[in-house]
Amino acid sequence: MGLASCGRWLVKGSNVTTANRIVRGPLFIAGVFILAAIGTGSSSAQQVTQHAALQPDLQTLQDNAKPRSQVRKPRVATAVAATDPAAPAASPKPVKKPQLATAVAATDPATAETSAKPAKKPQSARGPYYVDFRARTAASYGHAFVWYGKTSEKKGDIAGLHPAGDEVPYVLGHLMWVPSETGASYGDLDPQDRTANYRVYLNEADAQKVFAYIKHLQATSPLWNAQTTNCTAFIGRIASFMGLKVPFHLQRPENYINELKAINGGRQTAQLAPDASFQ
């Protein structure tokens, strides 16, 4: 009884264990599959995440592998402009408006010609004749005279007042009047002896009067004196007849010529009065 009871219990216990095993078998298998699926899914998710993380690196490697000469794709604005026929081919640069002075010069022919060639300053009209007041060195304080003639000719005439003879008339001429000469003297035409000059130009009509007056002075100046009728006084009378201002005559010939030019402002032309006459 006891054994039977005990045996029946065992049988029942055995059956329960078997039943539990039968029940647990499918559940266990299903659990294994679920765990496998979960593991596989997580692995796939990790692979997808890793693949997504490696995608930029792969793209960078592919870009670096491309040749440098490969043409880049145009940007969106360029692509749209290229495909849109209404869009302009290239935006033109704005044209600068010409300034007012340039526009006026371009539309006004007279203004354009004037601006292209600047007007030349009018030159002083020089006459065909001249009188050149000159000074040169000498054994004492120098000598003053005039060289006059026509500009187109190399040859000219000389007029100047100086004592006639050698040293004795010159020495006596400081105390009294001595005979004179009114033509060329030794050293008048030597360029190395010249110390000053002042040239004044004349027209033909005035030159004829001045040249005639010079010859008149030569003919009417028989005496020379160092203080009164000397060389500077002689050429001063010629300059005064030509309408020039004249400095005081008692000074060295070089200083006299330079002052004659200075007080007349360096003018290069002279014009006589219509009634100018020495007779």
Image: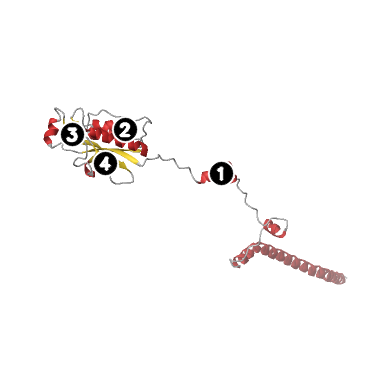
Which residue is tagged 1? Answer: 110
How far apart marks 4 and 3 lie (CA) works out to 18 Å
Q: Which residue is under mark 2?
A: 262
Q: The residue under label 2 is which amino acid type?
A: Ala
Q: Nearer the viewer, mark 4 or mark 2?
A: 4
Of labels 3 and 1, earlier in sequence is 1
The extreme right residue here reads: 1
20 or 142: which is nearer to us? 142
Is 37 situated above or below 222?
below
Instruction: Find disc 4 in the rendering and name its residue.
Output: 157
Q: What is the distance, in whole Å, between disc 1 and disc 4 at their CAs?
A: 51 Å
Name which residue lies at 26% across and 36% down: 215
Q: CA distance from mark 4 to mark 2?
A: 25 Å
The spot of residue 181 in percent (x, y) is: 19, 36
Q: To which quarter of the image does residue 260 belong?
A: top left
Dot 3 amino acid type:
Ser
* Mark carried by residue 180: 3
Residue at coordinates 36% horizontally, 42% vertically from top-left?
128
Inspect the image, locate mark 4, and give the three-letter code of the amino acid beneath it. Answer: Asp
